[in-house]
Image (cartoon, rainbow, N blue to C red):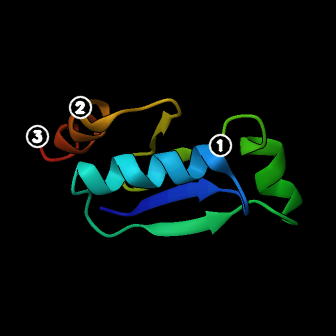
């Protein structure tokens, strides 16, 4: 699964998202920072943090919790 967490530097919500992903024991993911990337800023600027599964082409927008993350990940296995 190609998981990506879109986030910003110094983002309190992003820190909370990272904590939820850790609690959910999410598999390894790539962290991509929007700062100074106009294309990503245009797409995700108001939505960060966003967890994206690049393989399935689906996204989980904040706010999410452990159960939402687990459901999002489980949907990719079935």
What residue is drawn where x is 30% and y is 31%? Answer: 68
- Is the N terminus in the top left, top right, bottom left or bottom right quadrant? bottom left
What residue is drawn where x is 64% and y is 55%? Answer: 7
Check residue 67 in the rendering and tell me which mark sits there, or answer none.
Answer: 2
Q: Position of residue 64 (x, y in %)?
A: 42, 32
Who comes first in sequence, dot 1 or dot 3?
A: 1
In the image, taking residue 57 as reference, residue 14 lies left or right, namely right
As drawn, 22 above or below 73: below
Residue ID for mark 1: 48
Who comes first in sequence, dot 3 or dot 2?
A: 2
**What's the CA distance linking mark 3 and mark 2?**
17 Å
What residue is drawn where x is 54% and y is 67%? Answer: 31
* Quadrant in which residue 49 is drawn: top right
Residue ID for mark 3: 78
**Residue nearest the observer in this picture, 23 or 40:** 23
Q: Position of residue 19 (x, y in %)?
A: 40, 52
Q: Position of residue 3 (x, y in %)?
A: 40, 60
In the image, taking residue 32 as reference, residue 39 lies left or right, namely right
């Amino acid at each position: 699964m190609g998981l990506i967490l879109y986030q910003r530097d110094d983002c309190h919500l992003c820190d909370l998202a990272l904590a939820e992903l850790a609690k959910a024991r999410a598999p390894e993911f790539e962290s991509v920072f929007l700062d100074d990337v106009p294309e990503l800023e245009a797409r995700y600027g108001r939505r960060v943090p966003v967890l994206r599964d690049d393989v399935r082409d689906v996204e989980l927008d904040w706010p999410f919790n452990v159960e939402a993350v687990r459901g999002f990940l489980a949907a990719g296995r079935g």
